[in-house]
Image: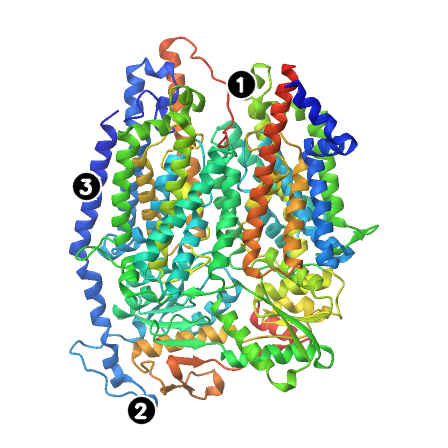
C-alpha cells in the first residue's frame, strides 16, 4: 500500500504532462485561427455607404475579409440563465438572428455570480465565436477574459450591465443612467401625496453596479427644488433574494412609520416590497414603484400597491444588442464615438449614434400603469 | 465538592431556582432570551413589538420553523439534511405550476405539494438509511439534483401572481383571532411532531438510534428504518414549508429558497438539537428558528448600518452555540458531582 | 501509505475488516477497486468524451480555462481534506476567501503596497482559522456549528471592511498572476500554486508523523490522546492552515477577477466539500488520501469543461456532480455487498454482520 499513492502521483503527473504537451503544441492553433476572422475592420468595402461615413480608413490587412453574414455565430452570456428577464432579451436576440442572419446561443451561470461568468467567456473564446454579447455581473471581473476574447478577434457587445470600459466594442445601454434616476424620482413624486413624504430605496446587492448608479442619479435628481417635499430615508439591500428583500421591506415599514414610497429598482425587490405592503395591510398608505416586469407586477398594479412602475423594452434590448454585434462583425461599425447606424424596426427606423465610451442607448423606459399593463403582459410574456 | 453544590443552591433562593430551571431547559432559555431581546429593542424601536411587525416576522419565521422541525428529527438520528432548501424550492414551484395549469383545486394542490416533499424525503431516506451513504454526502448530492429538477421543470419560467388563481397568496396574510395562519400551521406541526417524539415508542427509539446506534440495534431497534423515517418526515415538512413559501412570496423562481438550508439547520442547532445526535427537542428547534428570525428583524428595525448586519448575525449564532456548550458542560459537571456525592 | 495500520483509505472495499483481510482474492480485488484508480478511470473516460465532443477540448487554451476555473476551490480542498480526516469540517472557507479579498482591496485602496498587503491578509487568514480552531479544540464545540457561525461572521466582516465598494485598480502584475499562465506554457499560475501545495500536502499527509497524527485523531480521538497525540493541537493547527489557505485562495480570486468585492467566493464551500468527498475521503473521519482529492478536482474540472463546451447549462452540471457524488459512494457499497456474499459462499460461514450504522455527521 505504501507505494500506491506514489504510482498514482506518477500517473497523474504523466497525464498532466501529456495534456500540457498537447497544449503547448496546440496553443498556436486557437490564437492563430481567429486571425483570419480578425481583420473584419477591412470589411468597410461591404458596408452600406450611409453608415460608412464616420469610419476612418481602417488599417488594411492582407488577410481576406471572410466574415460573411451567414458565418455570424454569437454567444450570449447573461448574468444568470433561466431568469425571465434575460430570457426575454435572448428571445429578442434570436428574433434578430432570424431577421438579420446568423445564430445566437445563450449560455451562462445558473446563479448571478461574476466568478462563474468567466469560464463561459473563455469557452466561447476557445470555440471561436464571432461575437460575445454579455451582461456583466461585475464590470472588472469579466474584463480580462473579455479583453482576451477581443484579442482573439471576437467582437464584444455589452448589454444590460456594462463590462469595464475597454473590455467591449460597444455597450448597448437600456436607458441612460440619469434618465432612469429622474424617472424613478418622478414616479415616487407621482405616488406620494402632493409629492411630499418619506421615500426609501430597496436595492439589489450592495455591489450591484447598475443599481448603485441609478441610486446616485436619484439623489442627484432629488436636489431639484421640484422634489423638495420628498425626504430620503436611505437605501437597504435585498440581494435580489425574495426572502431577504421581504425582510428588508418589512423592516422599512416598521422603522419608518411615515414612509410613503418604496422605490425598488430591481425586479425581485419590487415584487417583494409590493407583496409586503399588501400583506401588512398598508395598501393605499405606502406605495411601491421602481423597475419590474409587467407580469410580475400586474397583480399589484391592479391591487393598488404599485400603481406605476417602469421598464425598458427588453425584447428590443436583445434585438439591438444582436444587431450591433452583427454590424461589428461585418465591419459596418467599429464602435467609435460618433458612428451611426440604423436597425430596422427599432427607434422608429431612425439612426442610433454611438456615444461616449462606445455606448448606444436603446431609448426611454416605458411606464406601466393599470391602463396599459394587460397589453404589455401579453406582449412581453414575462 | 458537596459544599459547592449547596452553596450554589443556597445563593440565589427563589431567583436562583428560577434561573436554574431556565438554564436547564433550552426551550425556556430561548423564551427568556426572546423576552429580553424584545424589551431591549423596544426601548430603541418601539414598533418592534407592534402587532403588525410581529405578525410579519412570525409568518416568515413559521415557514423556516416547520422545516427546522423536520431537520431536527434528522439531526437527532445523527444525520443532517442539506437538501431541504431544494425540496422547499421544488415543491413551491411545482404547486404553483399545478395551479397555473388548473390541474388540481387549491387544497388538493397543497396536499400534492406535501406528498411530493415526502417522496423526495424518501429518496434521501433510501440513499442514507438503506444504502448507508453518509448523510452529508447524500444530501449534498440531492441538493444539486433536486435543484436541477426545478430548473428542468421551470425551464426559464417564473410564476407570478398573474399566472395563479386569485386568492393563491391570501393565506399568507390571513389571521385567526389575530394569530397569523402560518403560525397556526407551524404550531400544529410542532405539537404533533413533539407529541410523537416524546410519548411514542417510535420517538424514543429515534432518540436511541441517534445517541447510540449499536446499543439501539442490539436492543432490537431497526435503526435503518428510523433513519429512513426521519428523512422522509423531513421531506414531508419541507414540502409543507414549500407550499407556504410560494404563498408568502407570490413570485416563484427556479432558484426560490436557495441558501435557506443553513438557516434551517442553524435554527435547529440554536434550539438545542445537538449535532452529535440523540438530544434536543423539536420545540427547541422551532423556537430556535423563531429566535433567529427575531434577531434578524431586530437588527433591521434598529436601522443598524447595512454593512454590519451579517457580521452581527454571525456573531449571535456563534455566541448562542458557544454559550450553550458552556452551560451544558457545567450542568454535566454538576450532574457528575451529584452522582459522586 | 503512511496511514498503514489504520484500515483502508477511502470508502473502498477493504474497510470491511476481518472477512476480507484474510482472503487473498478479496484483497487483490480491493487493490484493483481502489477509489483512486476508479477516479483515474473516470478522468480518462471524461477526457476521451470531451475530446470527441469538441475539437478544442484538448487545446492549451481550454486546459488553461478548465484548470484556472477550479484552481481556488482545489486549493481550499487540500486543508479541508485533512480537517475532514480528523472528523471535523470547515464551512467558513468561502467567507474567509471573501474576507481576505476584501481586506486586500481595502489595504490597497488605503495605499498599502501589495507586497505588504498580501502577507497581512494571509495573517488575517491564520487568525480566522485560529478562532475556528480554538472554538473547536479548546471550547470543544462541534465544528459544523462553529464554522456555520463564522461563515456568516467572516462574510459580515468582509462587508464591514469594504462595504459596497469594488476595488479593481490592482497593478497589472497582480491581475496577470491571477489570469495569466506561467510564461511559455499553458499552465495557469493558479494551477502552479496548486501543484506546489499539493506536493507539500501529499508529502506531509502520507509521509510524516503529522499525517499519521491526523489519521489517528480521526480514527479514534481518545485512543490517540492516550497514546500521546495532542489531538487539540492537531486540530488547532489544521484550522489555522485552512484559514491561511482560504485567505490565499481569496487573494488568487481577487487577482483572477481583478476585483476585490465583499461577496467574492460566495458559495464555494459546497464545491470544496464535494471535491473532498468525491475524492473518497470518509466524511466520518479517519480515511482518505490527498491523491484522491487531487483526482476528484481534476474530474470535476474536466466534467465542467466538457459540459460547458457541449453547451449544457450549469444547473445540469450540478446534477451531474450530484449524481457522481451519490453513485460514487453507492457503487462501491453494492460491490462490497456482492463481494461479501461471494466470500461468504466461498468460506461457508457467516461473516460477522455489523450493525447497520446510519451515515454519521461529523461529531465532536
Relative image position of residue A209 (x, y in whole percent): 47, 69
The residue that appears at 31% across and 76% down in the rendered structure is A329
In this view, the residue in front, C103 or A41, is C103
Most distant residue in the top direction: C348
CB under 8 Å between callouts 1 and 3? no
Residue B286 at x, y = what percent?
Answer: 67, 40
User: How far apart in space, not on screen, are marks 1 and 3 (Cα)?
Assistant: 46 Å
**Mark 1 falls within which chain?**
B
Q: Which residue in the structure is indicated by mark 1?
A: B214
Q: Is residue C177 left or right of residue A201?
A: left
Disc 1 versus disc 3: nearer the observer: 1
Q: Provide residue B125's location: percent of width, then percent of height.
A: 55, 33
Q: Which callout, 2 or 3, points to the residue nearer the camera?
A: 3
Q: Residues within 10 Å of mark 2 (few under 14, many from 20)?
A: some
N-terminal-most mark, 2 or 3: 3
Up-down relation of residue C18 to residue C91 (above or below): above
Would residue A72 be found to the left or right of residue B326 on screen?
left
Discs 1 and 3 share one subunit: no
Residue bearing mark 2: A53
Using the rendered image of the protein, determine whether residue A312 is visible from the camera's viewpoint: yes
Position of C243 relative to C104 (above/below): above
The image quarter containing residue C242 is top left
Label 2's element? loop
Q: In the shown orientation, is residue A329 left or right of residue A94?
A: left
Amino acid at each position: 500500500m505504501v507505494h500506491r499513492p506514489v504510482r498514482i502521483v506518477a500517473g497523474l503527473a504523466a497525464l498532466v504532462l501529456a495534456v500540457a504537451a498537447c497544449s503547448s503544441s496546440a496553443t498556436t492553433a486557437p490564437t492563430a485561427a481567429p486571425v483570419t476572422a480578425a481583420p473584419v475592420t477591412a470589411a468597410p468595402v461591404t458596408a452600406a455607404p450611409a453608415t460608412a461615413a464616420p469610419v476612418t480608413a481602417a488599417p488594411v490587412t492582407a488577410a481576406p475579409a471572410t466574415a460573411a453574414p451567414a458565418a455570424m455565430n454569437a454567444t450570449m452570456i447573461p448574468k444568470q440563465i433561466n431568469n425571465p428577464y434575460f430570457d426575454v432579451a435572448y428571445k429578442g436576440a434570436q428574433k434578430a438572428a432570424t431577421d438579420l442572419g446568423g445564430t445566437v446561443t445563450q449560455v451562462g451561470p445558473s446563479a448571478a455570480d461574476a466568478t462563474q461568468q468567466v469560464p463561459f467567456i473563455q469557452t466561447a473564446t476557445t470555440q471561436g465565436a464571432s461575437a460575445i454579447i454579455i451582461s456583466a455581473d461585475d464590470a472588472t471581473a469579466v474584463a480580462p477574459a473579455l479583453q482576451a476574447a477581443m484579442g482573439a478577434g471576437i467582437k464584444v457587445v455589452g448589454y444590460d450591465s456594462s463590462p469595464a470600459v475597454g473590455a467591449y466594442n460597444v455597450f448597448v445601454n437600456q436607458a441612460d443612467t440619469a434618465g432612469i434616476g429622474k424617472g424613478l424620482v418622478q414616479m415616487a413624486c407621482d405616488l406620494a401625496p402632493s409629492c411630499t413624504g418619506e421615500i426609501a430605496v430597496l436595492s439589489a446587492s450592495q455591489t450591484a453596479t447598475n443599481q448603485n448608479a441609478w441610486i446616485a442619479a436619484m439623489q442627484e435628481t432629488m436636489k431639484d427644488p421640484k422634489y423638495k417635499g420628498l425626504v430620503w430615508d436611505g437605501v437597504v439591500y435585498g440581494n435580489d433574494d425574495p426572502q431577504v428583500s421581504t425582510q428588508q421591506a418589512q423592516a422599512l415599514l416598521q422603522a419608518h412609520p411615515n414612509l410613503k414610497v418604496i422605490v425598488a429598482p430591481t425586479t425581485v425587490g419590487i415584487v417583494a416590497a409590493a407583496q409586503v405592503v399588501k400583506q401588512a395591510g398598508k395598501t393605499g398608505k405606502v406605495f411601491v414603484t421602481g423597475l419590474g416586469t409587467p407580469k410580475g407586477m400586474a397583480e399589484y398594479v391592479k391591487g393598488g400597491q404599485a400603481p406605476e412602475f417602469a421598464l425598458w423594452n427588453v425584447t428590443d434590448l436583445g434585438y439591438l444588442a444582436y444587431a450591433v454585434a452583427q454590424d461589428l462583425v461585418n465591419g459596418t461599425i467599429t464602435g467609435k464615438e460618433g458612428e451611426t447606424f440604423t436597425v430596422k424596426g427599432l427607434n422608429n427606423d431612425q439612426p442610433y449614434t454611438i456615444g461616449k465610451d462606445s455606448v448606444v442607448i436603446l431609448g426611454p423606459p416605458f411606464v406601466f400603469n393599470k391602463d396599459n399593463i394587460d397589453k404589455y403582459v401579453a406582449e412581453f410574456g414575462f | 465538592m458537596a459544599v459547592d453544590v449547596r452553596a450554589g443552591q443556597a445563593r440565589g433562593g427563589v431567583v436562583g431556582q428560577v434561573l436554574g430551571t431556565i438554564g436547564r431547559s433550552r426551550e425556556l432559555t430561548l423564551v427568556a432570551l426572546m423576552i429580553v431581546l424584545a424589551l431591549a429593542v423596544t426601548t430603541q424601536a418601539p414598533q418592534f413589538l407592534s402587532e403588525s411587525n410581529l405578525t410579519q416576522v412570525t409568518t416568515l419565521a413559521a415557514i423556516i420553523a416547520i422545516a427546522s422541525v423536520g431537520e431536527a428529527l434528522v439531526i437527532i438520528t445523527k444525520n443532517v439534511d442539506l437538501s431541504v432548501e431544494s425540496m422547499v424550492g421544488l415543491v413551491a414551484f411545482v404547486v404553483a405550476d399545478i395551479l397555473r395549469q388548473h390541474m388540481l383545486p387549491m387544497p388538493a394542490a397543497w396536499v400534492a405539494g406535501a406528498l411530493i416533499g415526502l417522496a423526495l424525503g424518501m429518496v434521501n431516506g433510501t440513499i442514507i438509511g438503506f444504502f448507508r451513504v453518509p448523510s452529508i454526502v447524500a444530501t449534498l448530492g440531492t441538493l444539486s439534483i433536486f435543484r436541477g429538477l426545478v430548473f428542468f421543470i421551470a425551464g426559464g419560467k417564473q410564476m407570478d401572481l398573474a399566472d395563479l388563481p386569485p386568492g393563491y397568496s391570501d393565506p399568507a396574510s390571513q389571521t385567526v383571532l389575530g394569530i397569523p395562519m402560518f403560525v397556526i400551521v407551524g404550531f400544529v406541526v410542532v405539537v404533533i411532531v413533539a407529541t410523537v417524539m416524546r410519548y411514542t415508542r417510535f420517538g424514543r427509539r429515534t432518540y436511541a438510534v441517534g445517541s447510540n446506534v449499536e446499543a439501539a440495534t442490539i436492543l432490537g431497534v431497526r435503526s435503518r428504518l428510523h433513519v429512513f423515517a426521519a428523512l422522509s418526515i423531513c421531506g414531508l415538512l419541507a414540502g409543507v414549508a414549500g407550499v407556504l413559501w410560494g404563498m408568502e412570496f407570490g413570485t416563484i423562481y427556479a432558484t426560490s429558497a436557495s441558501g435557506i438550508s443553513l438557516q434551517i439547520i442553524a435554527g435547529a442547532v440554536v434550539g438545542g438539537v445537538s449535532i452529535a445526535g440523540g438530544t434536543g427537542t423539536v420545540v427547541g428547534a422551532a423556537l430556535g428558528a423563531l429566535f433567529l428570525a427575531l434577531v434578524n428583524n431586530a437588527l433591521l428595525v434598529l436601522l443598524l448600518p447595512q454593512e454590519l448586519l451579517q457580521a452581527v448575525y454571525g456573531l449571535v449564532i456563534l455566541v448562542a452555540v458557544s454559550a450553550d456548550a458552556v452551560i451544558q458542560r457545567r450542568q454535566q459537571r454538576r450532574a457528575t458531582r451529584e452522582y459522586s456525592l | 501509505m503512511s496511514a498503514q495500520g489504520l484500515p483502508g483509505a477511502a470508502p473502498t472495499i477493504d474497510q470491511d475488516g476481518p472477512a476480507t483481510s484474510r482472503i487473498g482474492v478479496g484483497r487483490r480485488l480491493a487493490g484493483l477497486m481502489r477509489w483512486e484508480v476508479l477516479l483515474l478511470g473516470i478522468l480518462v473516460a471524461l477526457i476521451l468524451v470531451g475530446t470527441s465532443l469538441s475539437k478544442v477540448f484538448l487545446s492549451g487554451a481550454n486546459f488553461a480555462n478548465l484548470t484556472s476555473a477550479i484552481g481556488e476551490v482545489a486549493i481550499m480542498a487540500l486543508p479541508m481534506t485533512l480537517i475532514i480526516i480528523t472528523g471535523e469540517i470547515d464551512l467558513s472557507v468561502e467567507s474567509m476567501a471573501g474576507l481576505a479579498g476584501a481586506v486586500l482591496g481595502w489595504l490597497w485602496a488605503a495605499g498599502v503596497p501589495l507586497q505588504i498587503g498580501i502577507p497581512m491578509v494571509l495573517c488575517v487568514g491564520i487568525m480566522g482559522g485560529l478562532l475556528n480552531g480554538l472554538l473547536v479544540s479548546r471550547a470543544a464545540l462541534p465544528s459544523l456549528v462553529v464554522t456555520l457561525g463564522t461563515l456568516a461572521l467572516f462574510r459580515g466582516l468582509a462587508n464591514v471592511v469594504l462595504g459596497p465598494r469594488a476595488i479593481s485598480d490592482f497593478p497589472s502584475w497582480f491581475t496577470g498572476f491571477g489570469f495569466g499562465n506561467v510564461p511559455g506554457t499553458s499552465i495557469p499560475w493558479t494551477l502552479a500554486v496548486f501543484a506546489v501545495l499539493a506536493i507539500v500536502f501529499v508529502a506531509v499527509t502520507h509521509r510524516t508523523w503529522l499525517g499519521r497524527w491526523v489519521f489517528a485523531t480521526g480514527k479514534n480521538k481518545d485512543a490517540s490522546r492516550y497514546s500521546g497525540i495532542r489531538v487539540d493541537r492537531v486540530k488547532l493547527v489544521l484550522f489555522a492552515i485552512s484559514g491561511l489557505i482560504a485567505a490565499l485562495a481569496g487573494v488568487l480570486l481577487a487577482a483572477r477577477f481583478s476585483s476585490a468585492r465583499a461577496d467574492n467566493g460566495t458559495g464555494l464551500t459546497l464545491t470544496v466539500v464535494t471535491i473532498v468527498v468525491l475524492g473518497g475521503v470518509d466524511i466520518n473521519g479517519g480515511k482518505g488520501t490527498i491523491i484522491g482529492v487531487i483526482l476528484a478536482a481534476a474530474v470535476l474540472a474536466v466534467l465542467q469543461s466538457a459540459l460547458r463546451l457541449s453547451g449544457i447549462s450549469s444547473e445540469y452540471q450540478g446534477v451531474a456532480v450530484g449524481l457522481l457524488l451519490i453513485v460514487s459512494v453507492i457503487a462501491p457499497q453494492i460491490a462490497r455487498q456482492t463481494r461479501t456474499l461471494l466470500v461468504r459462499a466461498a468460506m461457508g460461514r457467516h461473516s460477522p454482520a455489523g450493525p447497520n450504522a446510519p451515515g454519521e455527521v461529523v461529531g465532536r
